[in-house]
Amino acid sequence: MPDGPPPTSCRVRGTLLILLALMAPANYTTDGESMLEVARSLAFHGKFSVPCGDGISLANANGTCFSSWYPLLSIAMVPFVLLGHAVVAVGGIPSRAGEEAALAVPAIATAGAAAFTAALALELGADRRRAVFAAVAAVFGTEALTYSRTLFAEPLGALCVAAAAWGLLGTTRGRRAVGMAAVILAILSKPQLVLVGPGSVLPALIPRH
């Protein structure tokens, strides 16, 4: 299979639409609220610190509070927080309601992971129909569907891991650069994914004949 972007068939785009339709009406997780608070702070104050006294933040020696959760999801949510606030400002809706637009990030990340799953299936010899089936099965046949409806780090981590595997399997510099960048982002999405680095890079270093 030639190097190139992962396949974006109508079915993969349809997967995204289904996930968006199944979005939760509001965030209901403590860690999700903490990461959303960081996104608010980045969007409106340009800093990672958050208000103290909410019971989910940690204070440093200077008394400044920070979230104890992972930074990448908060960064990814910033454009959605800003977009949500712009939309509700036009409609006269309470401003906090606009931040629920950030709930789209896990759904988008899950659909992206599905696209890379299809690309990996093609790399392993599947035809296009089976590759799309693998992507759909990864989303709707695993816990990915549940995580896509929550502000957890797992969907973004899954996207980064899938992108890393796809990129490092490539033969061009550009594609391998994508893979290396995805490895770094995977660690930022969830530090426990640090093992993705050696696990992805070492096979890519094996000479191909």
Image: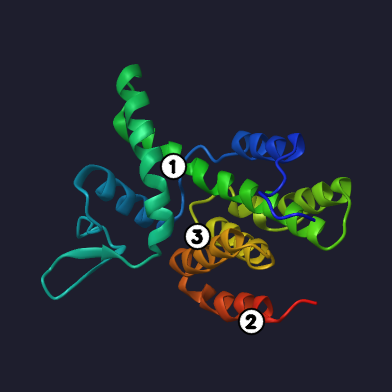
Residue 100 drawn above or below residue 138:
above
Q: Residue furthest left?
A: 62
Q: From the viewer's side, name the closer residue of 116 and 67.
A: 116
Q: For mark 1, give the secondary structure.
A: helix
Q: Colour mode?
A: rainbow
Residue where numbered disc 3 is placed: 153
The residue carrying pointer 3 sits among few (fewer than 14), some (14 to 19) or many (20 or more) residues within 10 Å by Cα, namely many
Q: From the viewer's side, name the closer residue of 30 and 199.
A: 199
Q: Residue at x 47, y 68 (%)?
A: 184
Residue 98 drawn above or below residue 45:
above
Q: Residue at x 58, y 81 (%)?
A: 198
Residue where numbered disc 2 is placed: 202
The spot of residue 28 in percent (x, y) is 46, 49
Q: Earlier in the sequence, mark 3 or mark 1?
A: 1
Closest to the camera, between mark 1 and mark 2, is 2
- The dot on residue 102 is 1
Q: Earlier in the sequence, mark 1 or mark 2?
A: 1
Amino acid type, label 2: Leu
Q: For mark 3, give the secondary structure.
A: loop
Q: Residue at x 68, y 51 (%)?
A: 4
The spot of residue 56 in percent (x, y) is 31, 63
Q: Mark 3 to mark 1: distance in Å? A: 13 Å
Q: Earlier in the sequence, mark 2 or mark 3?
A: 3
Q: Quadrant of residue 62?
A: bottom left
Q: Mark 1 to mark 2: distance in Å? A: 35 Å
Residue 91 drawn above or below residue 155:
above
